[in-house]
Image (cartoon, rainbow, N blue to C red):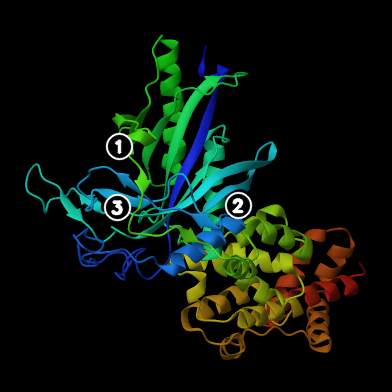
Amino acid sequence: MPLSDFQTVIGLEVHAQLLTQSKIFCGCSTAFGAEPNHHTCPVCLGMPGVLPVLNQRVVEYAVRTGLALGCAVKSTSVWSRKNYFYPDLPKGYQITQYDQPICEWGELVIDTPSGEKTVRVRRIHLEEDAGKSVHDATASAGQSLVDLNRAGVPLMEIVSEPDLRDADEAVEYLKVLRDVLVYLGVNDGNLEEGSFRCDANVSVMPKGSTTYGQRCELKNLNSFRFLKQAIEYEAARQVDVLESGGKVDQETRLWDVNKGITRSMRSKEDAHDYRYFPEPDLPPLLVSDALRDSQRQSLPELPRAKRTRFMSEYGLPAYDARILTAERPLADFFEACAKHVSDAKKLSNWFLGELSRLLKEEGTPISALRFTPAQLGELLATVEKGTVSANAAKDVLGEMFRTGRPPADIIAEKGLAQVSDVGAVEAVVDDILAKNAGEVEKYKAGKKSVYGFFVGQVMKAMKGKGNPGLVNELLKKKLGE
């Protein structure tokens, strides 16, 4: 059977580093980019005789995430030791949650070409991150170095059910989940630095079948593009294996970015291979009703709900609303600006156009803008009133972006204000028409192309400061239209 006769089945395991200042079981910093092995202590180095102390903020973030995804937040969950040996795991085991996680059975709604789709979230559990093996020129030939700065950084693992049916759905799920976590303030969503990463469990089955095939776990998926490419390649590989009479092995495979293929790393472990047992140095994790209630009350409006509201409240199309609500600071800035203008769609055009261009060119986040939402609203209000032209407003916005100066000061200094006084504009229009009586006759005789000549002459006489709308209105009136 060809690839088109098979159905891809995908489940994602997302690992999100939590935005705490200290690690999950000790007081070491979680800051990224420090010198190797600088943010370490006897606890995260796994020294004998030390005991872990749980970071309360980690629990709060997990509860917040569980509530946002509609999970059941467990009153009691249990820590376990996951035993395996790897150079970047100093204790020889990882403290995690196994059969009793902190959150279970939530869901996330995504958009697909055929409409909305609900993806089930099986569980959310907490664990400590491992260190990092470094393979670079500073190591001797044939050696790798170990950086334990990351060891003990709090991780939240979010495991979906195998509800995703193609690579595009997997990418959409990951993007939507990333947006939710960033909105909640629990993760920065940075795939490049590895603070937000995922593994994909991929299998194939004949279309119409209800029996899943053997799954393979894919790693090294540190971008949305790589996730899509790896899933598509792996699905095709598994179909080729089955079509040639072979059997898909349960294994962990690495996405090779340079070759565009997945490579076998090791056989996929089962739970018994890790010899899980309860963590003896930590009591069960108890979540009180008070903690659950406080986190529920602090939940922000999430991206999907905000997008729907932007469409209904501001009359924005779905495309605009999605972009404007993708990041919480951008959405907040837009709403603050909207209080100062009457046309939200025109405001959206400025956000998606000129403001977006400036932010991208300078690599500036919206939170670092030198001007306030009120000042941007003030500028756009002058365009609505006809005080300045749209082109002049772009120049003013650029100056505000660079200096943070108020728009009124820039407009006054550069003499950008348009003349909107009816009497003043009418006098210029009358003068131009009187001086060009021949052209007026041609226009009235049907040569409509000369209309642009009149507009140009009026704007030239007013040194470009005539209100274009008013100029056109008066010209048409005078020319008998």
Report x, y in % for residue 420: 77, 84
- Classify residue 129 by image quadrant: bottom left
Report x, y in % for residue 458: 74, 77
Cα separation, mark 2 vs mark 1, equals: 39 Å
The local crowd at label 3, few if under 14, some if 14 to 19, many if 20 or more residues have their Cα within 10 Å, is many
Q: Secondary structure at mark 3?
A: loop
Question: Residue shown at 33%/59% (left/top)?
Answer: 281
Q: Secondary structure at mark 1?
A: loop
Q: Is residue 432 above or below residue 200?
A: below
Q: Going by the picture, which residue comes out furthest to the top?
A: 245
Mark 3 or 1: in front is 3
**Residue hosting label 3:** 130
**Residue hosting label 2:** 71
* Front one among 397 and 118: 118
Question: Residue shown at 42%/28% (left/top)?
Answer: 234
The amino acid type of the residue labelled 1 equals Asn
